[in-house]
Amino acid sequence: MSVPQEIIFGLFAETVVPNASHHLPPPQMLQDSREQLLAIFIRNFQHASQTRDSAATSRFFKLFPAIGWEKEGLEVYSRFIVELIRVRISTGASAISSTYHTTALAMLLENIAIVVHQHQPIVDKYYGSGKMKPVLTTLLDECDDIIENLLEKWEREKFANLKLPELLEQTTRLLTLQSFHQETIPFDLRDLDKIVSDLAIMVCRWSLFKSFIASSINTTSGATQSNDHPTPFDLSSTKSNRLFERLETAYYVPLELRYLCSIIDKAYHLSESNRLEDPTITTTPDDVFYVLKVILKRLLPMGSLTATQQTLEGLRDVMDHKYLGLLKKKLDDTAGNLNTYRPDRPERESRISLIATLNDLDVSGSHLLQLVKDITDDSSLYQCYEHGQQTVAKQHVSSLGSLKGRLDSILKIGLELLFNQFLRPRLRNLIPEVFKDVSYVLNDEAYSTMEYREIIKKRFIRLWESALDGYKEIFTEHNFGLVFAMSVEALIRPWEKMVTSLRFNELGAMRFDFDLRSIVSYLSAQTTLGDIREKFVRLQQVSLLLNLDGEEDVAEFYNGSGIRWKLTLQEAKAVVSIRV
């Protein structure tokens, strides 16, 4: 109403009105006229909306503010929008479809988003900034009832063939007690996968809707507070939000973890090892980490920090106690078989079985690090999180990498078991055989003969390759590198001890230095993991001392050379004492 209040209630109006034509006081007369116009506008607006006359609907909607009935106009408009959404939902999805509930939910939220996007500029223009909020509040109240009804029907339908209460109770007990190897009630993994996928999709739709409302209503509309900042429109207090939070904590998290437990069991018991291919690896790591990636890719788009934290904490526990526990048990069982004579299972079979498990551990470590990197770097998975939560979500994902330490620990135990059982006995006599009947007290002729024949190098290569025969092909590159390093370390002390039992003249010391360098070069070329030369530092320092000038003082050279000695001064003097 554009007539100033001082005119309506002024002395002139009281004097002139009422009269014969207008017998009511001006304020009452204007109020009656406004109420009559309101009734006319409502009647015509409802008629236009029922007949789907968009032009008339828009025209009468714009008239309410002109006569001071903004609130009533928004109320009738809200009822119109609610009815419009109901019609679209009832005709948009087939009730017999297996995806009816998720489709209906998506259509409901999508239609509300379309309404906000299309109608908010009109409401703001004719009713004022922030006036879309009461419309949306009414719409969400109706939305709460529709969503509650949809979710109740979904629960009844999806859980009809699944003993959900028993399954949830048992899952909670298993996760709490971390007793992942107990007998469980039977269920169809495909049904469980569909249920968890439905849960993730529905929560994801709600998170997307919340993000859209936050970016649309809170940034372009809103009644301002005293500090001129928009009043935020918060959906976290709505009934719908509480319903979806219940889906996350009561259903999604435990069922997702139970799904992974079942996948690990199935992958472990159905694992196959193709021994015609190198290296020897079973199908277990690929199967488990593929499913783990699927789980993360449906968890993160849900945009729920609570579900993300709880699920990832549970995933770490399941992978630790279930997956790594099974691999550790397999190692222990294999170790037990090694100590028990079984004619039906020769040593080669036990060795290959052990190596396959060790390779599975190594591949699991590689898969784990790659998975964490891929998921952390994929920014598209974090779009539904609220501002500031993306970094926290990525930190939760990165926490999966802590399993690498546990993997490495089990792998180290297994490699040491294999080395002590199979390789150490083969390497025990390698150094004595290499230096058998060898003298480093040489004349010119003997030196030339050793230089020509390369006896030490050829013996070493033959015995070394015989000891490690077949391991490089069936091991992963990383595991072979670790076993290779362990084998080299096993030779160092016997080699040092062997050197101290020999005597060296000047030519012999030169020949020993050449033999040592040639063997170190050969070993360094066999693996790319680490620097093998570092393991020979003590022997190289022994060779250096053997080749000192006879007149040079050992203590003076030791203290003044600037070399970072691995040998003590006493050991250095002992080395020099074996020269003749």
Image (spheres, rainbow, N blue to C red):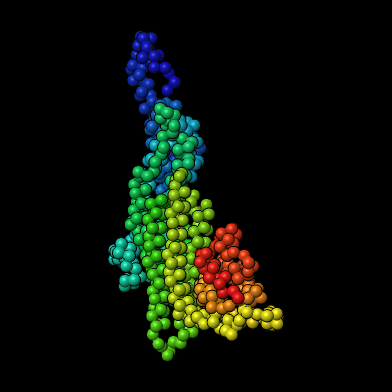
> Is residue 398 shown to the viewer in this render?
yes
**Which percent across, then down, holds residue 497?**
51, 75
- State which quarter of the image contains the N terminus: top left
Q: Residue at x 36, y 17 (%)?
A: 26
**Which percent across, then down, holds residue 501?**
53, 78
> Is residue 474 shown to the viewer in this render?
no
Q: Residue at x 39, y 83 (%)?
A: 339
Task: From the viewer's side, name the closer residue of 347 and 435.
Answer: 435
- Residue 250 found in image quarter: bottom left
Residue lying furthest front: 551
**Which percent across, then down, holds residue 303?**
44, 51
**In this image, 176 relative to 65: left or right?**
left
**In this image, 434 relative to 411: left or right?**
right
**In this image, 138 relative to 292: left or right?**
left
Task: From the viewer's side, name the closer residue of 572 and 109.
Answer: 572
- State which quarter of the image contains the C terminus: bottom right
- Residue 529 found in image quarter: bottom right
Q: Residue at x 59, y 74 (%)?
A: 579
Q: Residue at x 35, y 43 (%)?
A: 237
Total number of numbered labels?
A: 0
- Indicate whether 82 appears above or below 278: above
